[in-house]
Amino acid sequence: MSKYLLALVWPAGLAIIAGVAFVAARRAHEEPQQASGRSAREPGRRRGRRASARSWIGEAAAGSTLFAVAAVAGALAAFCIMALLGLLVVNHGLAIDKPVFSWIQGDRINQAGTALWSHGHQVHVVAAAMKRLTKIGDTWTTWGAAAAAAVCLAVTWRERRWLPPVALAAAIVIDHFTTLALRHVFHRLGPPTSPLGTYPSGGCDRCILFYGLIAYLLWREFSGKRTTAIWAAAAVAALGFNEAYSRVYLSLHWTTDALSGLLYGGLLLAGFVVAIRAACGRQAARRAAGPFPPVPVGIAPTEGASP
């Protein structure tokens, strides 16, 4: 019976995420909406003058430099936090990991040394489904999604078309080398069934970082509404939960490694969001303010009026 309760954790977790998102979106819908995305701005204020090729290249170079500095600073901050957390996980994480692993896989040997024919608490149908769903966080799957999104967003964005390719390419490079640095510092082996899995879980990290970054870029360009942001965050959270659950259910990672991967991906994503806002926040603020000063209420401009 307990194996079916373990299998129900997956849909229950997704239902909780959907429920929280529904409540938050409903409250946001009841509150006064304040437009923050490009689609909520007036069409006349979106465009402005077209920059020349030279100014566009200069803007892209300056924006890319500012973005790179902010992204690297965010990655360094995430590395320091995960390094401090790694001391706790590596030294004391097995107190949580081993009982969970033994309960899922089943105790193979009892105290007397006699082998037990225990199949653990995995359900064959659920395990088969998890083997497919866990590939969402694989390296080439997430990198392929990032490359496809970079091309599509570079074509569909009206301004700063350099930003999505730069952001997603930087995410691939920074995530790869920061993760390698963490694994070089903490030589932690994974479970006996998957010794290559280590701290932190790369699959959980990539789900949060890459899909979250794609969702943020889409939201920033095409929506900007609070309710849309809530549902986008819920979708990314569901992907991250699915990845963490599947990795632990299949014993590909220790439980603490999967949880650490979610936190790690969230820290990197936060750094990239700050970097994107730093690279284009000032221009967006000027464009939102509009090229003309506001006209006082009750005063109508007249034609031919003399000063």
Image: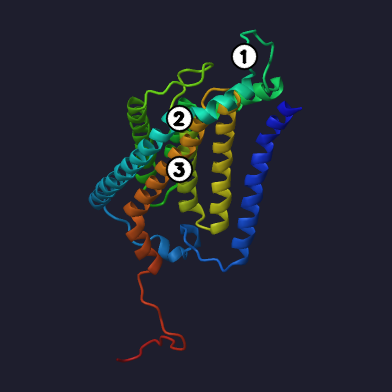
Give the quarter of the image for residue 120: top right
The disc at residue 266 is 3
Q: CA distance from mark 1 to mark 3?
A: 41 Å
User: Looking at the picture, does residue 102 appear above or below residue 172?
Assistant: above
Compare residues 208 and 224 and report the one nearer the observer: 208
- Determine whether the residue tagged by mark 2 lies in a helix, strand or loop: helix
> Looking at the picture, how far across and down is residue 173, in whole percent?
34, 33
Q: Which residue is mark 1?
A: 111
Q: Looking at the image, which residue sits at the far bottom?
A: 306
Q: Secondary structure at mark 3?
A: helix
Disc number lying in front (1 or 3)? 1
Q: Tell me the amino acid under the disc marked 3.
A: Gly
Q: Farthest residue toward the front?
A: 112
Within 10 angstroms of label 2, few (less than 14), some, or many (20 or more) residues?
A: many
Q: Is residue 94 visible?
A: yes
Whichever of callouts 1 and 2 sits on the residue coming sooner in the sequence is 1
Residue 144 appears in view: no
**Residue at image x 61%, y 8%?**
113
Q: Amino acid at mark 1?
A: Gln
Q: Position of residue 21 (x, y in %)?
A: 61, 51
Q: Quadrant of the N terminus?
A: top right
